[in-house]
Amino acid sequence: MRGVSLSLSAGKVLGLVGENGAGKSTLMNLLGGVLQPDGGAMRLADEAYAPKSPAEATRCGVAFVHQELNLFSNLSIAENLFVPAFPKNAFGFIDRAAMRRRATELLQAVELEVAPDRLLESLAPGERQLVEIAKALGQNARLMILDEPTSSLTSRESERLFALIERLRAQGLGMIYISHVLSDVLRLCDDIVVLRDGAIAGSGARAEFTTERLITLMVGRELQQLYPIRKQAPRDETVLQVESLSQPGVIESISFNLQRGEVLGLAGLMGAGRTELARILFGLDSFATGSLTLNGESIGALAPRERVQRGLAFLTEDRRAEGLLMDATIADNAALVALPQFARNALIESERLAAAVSAMTNSVQVRGATSNAQAVRKLSGGNQQKVVLAKWLLQKPSVFILDEPTRGVDVGARAEIYRIINELAESGAGVLMISSELEELIGMCDRMLVLRRGELTASFARAEFDREQILRAALG
């Protein structure tokens, strides 16, 4: 961070945008007491503010709603709302009755009509987000910081969140709203600050910004072509064939072919069965009937490891929990899948492996690391996603399943990920791309399938892409 100055008034929403690695997380860690500044000063409600810990920041009225929700799925809603400061009775035990009463009040404040004794794991992602906000309100927050709050929400859940933000604004709460969805920032925020390379690249009232200006300030250049132009058409050769695939209650009679060199989009609402289908294709979940063929070979009875060996790759929607070993190095993560290729007589050929990993991380342009020996958790979200891609690219698969490949990734890193996907297709790989962003699918895909309630409802060639028709097929 270098010379960052900003202000926020009560009852206002300040938008904070920037590429991954621009300094947003560092700034939030300074506000939250995780880090201490080397210079400068902060004031909260006209008083000096210099928290030495997150607990001190909370006591001062600064609350966070994190992208990765800090909630416990095995506890009740009420228990989550009061961890770790449970109300106590005169004997020093948890006052369950008082906890339920206060939990009910907090849930009513965010208009979440559920019983406080329900387990958190029974709630939808949007409802869990509201529980996190209710928890912040229970801490008597004067400043609330929302970090990518819509990253896991459906459109309907996002609208519910936006309505709550408007009510909290009317009640005088100041909020900092961090998001890569620039249209949401322009819709919700009174003022906007753009960070680039740890400094402010631009700031001002919302009316001073357009999406194009925000992108230019974020990346330091005009982004002329977000979606790359495909130079080669898909080949007339099937790499993945899915025939009448069914699993009761999950998917029903799914059939499609994926061609070599094709990017095939899979659209649908959250809960339509897209991720479930991807997990079945990769072998993580079972199916009752139907068949799967990869490069002419039946793979329906094979374990995930064997499918990987035959050329299948799966980039999951949750890179932190399922795609990376967060405490391991960049090099160790990138080598995970292809490691057997670098073994001779049960020994790893370290120099050859290191050279291959270095070449691959350079190819996907992993940034923000001094070396591949750095822990992957220290990278920004976009660069973590590039490490996941490098891990699979080193294996040279013939079919890529990409589930939400740009979720939580800034616009600059998105353009680089799109370039990688484009190069995969041009090299002859087949790509099945799942995304909740319709514009992304329209911009990247040669063909698009629409899934609704576990069934394929429509198929569109690129020349037939029509946003209204695709949404109609998804909604029913």
Image (cartoon, grey):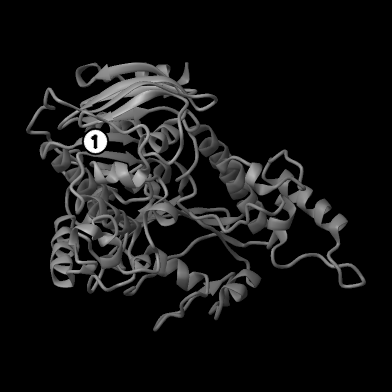
- In-front residue for pair 165/244: 244
Residue 290: image location, x then y, percent: 39, 22
Decide: few, some or many residues near mark 1? Use Cα within 10 Å; few <14, some 14-19, many ≥20: many
Q: Relative to 231, is 317 on the left or the right?
A: right
Residue 48 against residue 26 in the figure, above or below:
below
Judged from this view, the residue extending furthest toward the front is 345
User: The residue tagged with tag 1: helix, strand or loop?
Assistant: strand
Q: Relative to 99, is 463 on the left or the right?
A: left
- In-front residue for pair 313/161: 313
Residue 433 against residue 256 in the figure, above or below:
below
Residue 92: image location, x then y, percent: 87, 72
Residue 134 against residue 373 in the figure, above or below:
above
Please indicate, yes or no, whether residue 210 appears anywhere in the rendered image: no
Please indicate, yes or no, whether residue 407 appears anywhere in the rendered image: yes
Q: Please tell me in which quadrant of the rendered image residue 435 appears.
A: top left
Q: Relative to 11, is 351 on the left or the right?
A: left
Which residue is depicted at the point 14% across and 56% down?
A: 363
Q: Which residue is mark 1?
A: 431
Q: Label 1 amino acid?
A: Val
The image quadrant where one finds the N terminus is: bottom left
Which residue is depicted at the point 68% across and 56% down?
A: 80
Q: Please tell me in which quadrant of the rendered image residue 317 appears.
A: top left
Which residue is depicted at the point 47% across and 28% down?
A: 272
Residue 386: image location, x then y, percent: 26, 55
Judged from this view, the residue extending furthest toward the left is 231
Residue 7 against residue 71 in the figure, above or below:
below
Residue 32: image location, x then y, percent: 52, 70
Q: Please tell me in which quadrant of the rendered image residue 242 appears.
A: top left
Which residue is depicted at the point 45% across and 45% down?
A: 151
